[in-house]
Image (cartoon, rainbow, N blue to C red):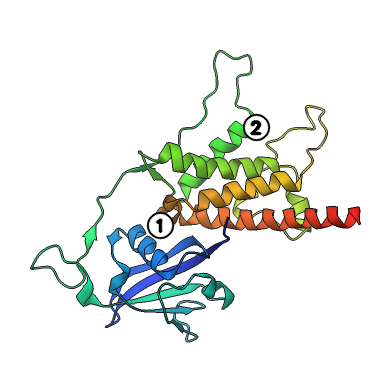
Amino acid sequence: MAALVCIVVSAKDTNGNSIFSAVAMCHRITDDFSDLFIAAASSSGLEMSPECVNSVNICSKVGSSDRIKISNISMQLNVAVELDKKMVEYTINSARLPSTSSNSNAFTVLMNKPKVCIMPKKYEVNTSSKVKKLSGPQQLYCDLIDWAQSTGCGWPSDIVEDSGKQALKSLSNALWYVDHCHARLKDASCHVPTELNKFQNYNNYKLLWHRPPIVKAARLGELVGDLYSALSLPSLSDKRNTVLAKIMGELAESLKQYKDRLENDNQNTKT
């Protein structure tokens, strides 16, 4: 699974008029600048072809003067990563924009029909069970749904139980696995993102007289792979889901670093 990069994307015409406002996108570094353009336009409710792009510039932040022109829109995004540029600015040839009628101006584009977005279904307490409460993993998943919804997150009803559930399940599974070791991750400089710090202490292994769970590199690798797989879903590039995608990407990177550290420690022990 290719690494992800979070980039802020914007587009304007040759006169400096905004085509779509800046939007944060998470993409694989092996994707190219045309893929990024299509996704960014789509997340802004526009259907636009890369053929209308006149030029592409990358820079470190909005309004900065350290712009570098990308010579080919087919170049991969790892160029921006290597040059430590977090902004991509597209300049559009307005004459190439599609118009929906003869009276349309140069900025009229085909709009996607808006969809109502919802959250995946939560677990419910089984009233016929002797235990009248959710399990730790179930409660964590439900709490993450509430949190994600508070950030504006959501999916159309036709994909919410697929893409939406996959994204939040990958996050829930990862947080459950490291529930007891946030402090250890922080000490190893692989901390859990601040926004997710409150999602811990769901695993009451001490109350159950269980031993502390052992964190293994192999399982971390699986969980990181699941996070990256979810982040590659088109719906995670939607504007409403950019906060969730950003935090999931940060968590995946932290857990990957910790996994690599465990593997190095294990290798050193063997030698």
Residue at 47% across, 84% down = 67
Mark 2 / mark 1, whichever is N-terminal: 2
Q: CA distance from mark 2 to mark 1?
A: 31 Å
Quadrant of the image containing the N terminus: bottom right
Report the residue marked by disc 2: 136
Residue 198 visible at all: no
Q: Give, as a three-letter code, the residue at label 2.
A: Gly
Q: Relative to 109, is 45 on the left or the right?
A: right
In the image, 87 versus 99, the foreground residue is 99
Q: Position of residue 71 (x, y in %)?
A: 42, 82
Q: Position of residue 143 (x, y in %)?
A: 55, 39
Residue at left 41%, top 78%?
Answer: 72
Q: Are marks 2 and 1 in contact (CB under 8 Å)?
A: no
Judging from the image, what secondary structure is the residue with disc 1 in?
Answer: helix
Mark 2 residue element: helix
Crowd class of label 2 (few under 14; some 14 to 19; many from 20; radius 10 Å): few
Determine which residue is flagged by label 1. Answer: 239
User: Looking at the image, which residue sits at the far left?
Assistant: 102
Residue shown at 29% from the left, 66% from the top:
49
On screen, residue 129 above or below 251: above
**Residue found 65% across the figure and 50% down from its top:** 197
Label 1 sits on what residue type?
A: Lys
